[in-house]
Image (spheres, helix red, strand yellow):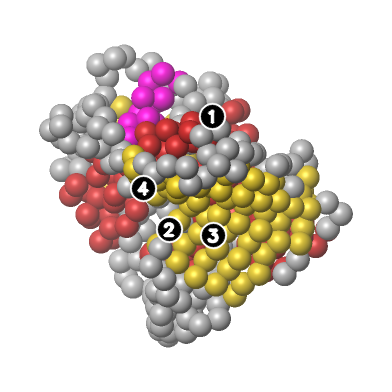
Amino acid sequence: MNRRHLLTTAAVTAASYKRVLGANDRISIGIIGTGNRGGQIWEQALSEEDVRPVAACDVYEPHLEKALSMASGRAKAYRDFRDVLEHRPMDAVLIATPDHWHAIQTIMACRAGLDVYVEKPLSLTVQEGRKMVSAARRYDRVVQTGSQQRSGPHYAEAVHAIRSGEIGAVHHVEAGLERNSMPGFGTPEDVEPPADFNYAMWLGPAPLKPCNPLRGLYHFRWFWDYSGGQMTNWGAHNIDIARWGMGVESPLSVSGCGGRYAIQDNGETPDVQEVLYEVEGGVLTWSVRELNGTRGSFLVFHGTKGDLEIDRKGYSIRGQRWQRKDPPMVPDRSSHPPSAQRSLNALHIRNFLDCVRSRDRPNADVEIGHRTALFCHLGNIATRLKKSLKWDADSESFVSDEQADQWLSKPYRSPWTLDL
């Protein structure tokens, strides 16, 4: 690790790796983390006609093999992400690893002179997020958070309607998720890591724990060492749009309660959670119920004249009148038929690629991702401490609460560090 760090630093410190992209140049892309979500954004990136895949990395061989197959032999295989960051030529990297890896990999990629598309939630802790913003600015990198709703035309239209007063003044927003996950995801015994799974690298900076089928791959989301449950899963999406619509950057205070009450499995994060944020001029709530429910993901802005409810299919306004807005047709710049309606994923990846060329800030810039993840992390901290906490946005710390401040960061397992 020290050798790689020295080599990478020496190679990129002087203005980092830079290549001026012409209008006809293809953007060379690599990916780190090629599992469920990684496979989705890799496939979308590969569908863009100005993308050239050059590298793919995963610690789980079946996922890596699938990603290589999707690239039709055009990408080189890697099993250590540090080697990917040294691949040249390469302009940008997609990061879709578990949350506990996002900060280290993003910062190292920025230091290596690469632009970054990193999946949401941006970070595992508040401290990580702030350092990721600092790295992006220090190395002048484009860093897009994978909050694809930010690139949805009907989301932008709804936010405009809210801010222009179409539903009156908004002082209350409710966001949440309900579904049926009963009875849970099982209680498998610990196992020896499979031969095709580099478990030590998968853990990385996280505490050393025995390998368990439930902890790895998709279900890492239900363990505090790697993620923050539905709060940082779906909360990172809908709280993001709630912030956007309300025009708020940070909470004033937060309180929360919840636990894993009904689901019987090895998971740790809440199956029921209620979080209340006080923000400038109003209240934002986050609600989770994994015991039953038909609403799925929901987000409702309550105004003095009416309500606006929005999801990925469109939005509706209730109260004075009713309207339904479906995502509009967007000119397609990939190999799909021109008449095809582009998905949020497609629009978000396209926005990132356009910013790699223009050097503009993307729709879900790293600072936006950090402020949304911060809301999520504070909600989980209040829930776990069962306390009401006041927040100082300027110092990014709690007001007169040293115990809560200790939850704003996490120790890393040696030899991993969070160096800029």
Q: CA distance from mark 4 to mark 1?
A: 21 Å
The residue singled out by tag 4 in the image is 312
Q: CA distance from mark 4 to mark 3?
A: 18 Å
- Percent from the top left, x then y, of residue 398? 78, 52
Secondary structure mostly taken by the magenta-highlighted segment of the chain = helix
Residue furthest out toward the left: 337
Cβ atoms at labels 3 and 2 below 8 Å apart:
no
Q: CA distance from mark 1 to mark 2?
A: 25 Å
Q: Nearer the viewer, residue 144 or 182?
A: 182
- Which kind of residue does numbered mark 1 sit on? Ser
Relative placement, left or right, of 32 versus 175 is left
- Which kind of residue does numbered mark 4 sit on? Arg
The residue singled out by tag 1 in the image is 164
Cβ atoms at labels 4 and 2 below 8 Å apart:
no
Q: How many marks?
A: 4
Q: Residue 303's quadrant in the figure? A: top right
Q: Which circle, 3 or 2, is nearer the viewer?
A: 2
The residue singled out by tag 2 in the image is 297
Q: Is residue 93 above or below residue 103?
A: above
Residue 355: within the magenta? yes
- Percent from the top left, x then y, of residue 240? 53, 45
Q: CA distance from mark 3 to mark 1?
A: 29 Å
Label of residue 231 in the image = 3
* Mark found first going from the N terminus, 3 or 2: 3
* Mark found first going from the N terminus, 1 or 2: 1
Q: Residue at x 86, y 54 (%)?
A: 400
Cβ atoms at labels 3 and 1 below 8 Å apart:
no
Q: Residue at x 22, y 37 (%)?
A: 341
Q: Is residue 66 above or below residue 180?
A: above
* Mark found first going from the N terminus, 4 or 1: 1
Q: Callout 2: few (<14), some (14-19), or many (20+) C-alpha neighbours within 10 Å?
A: some
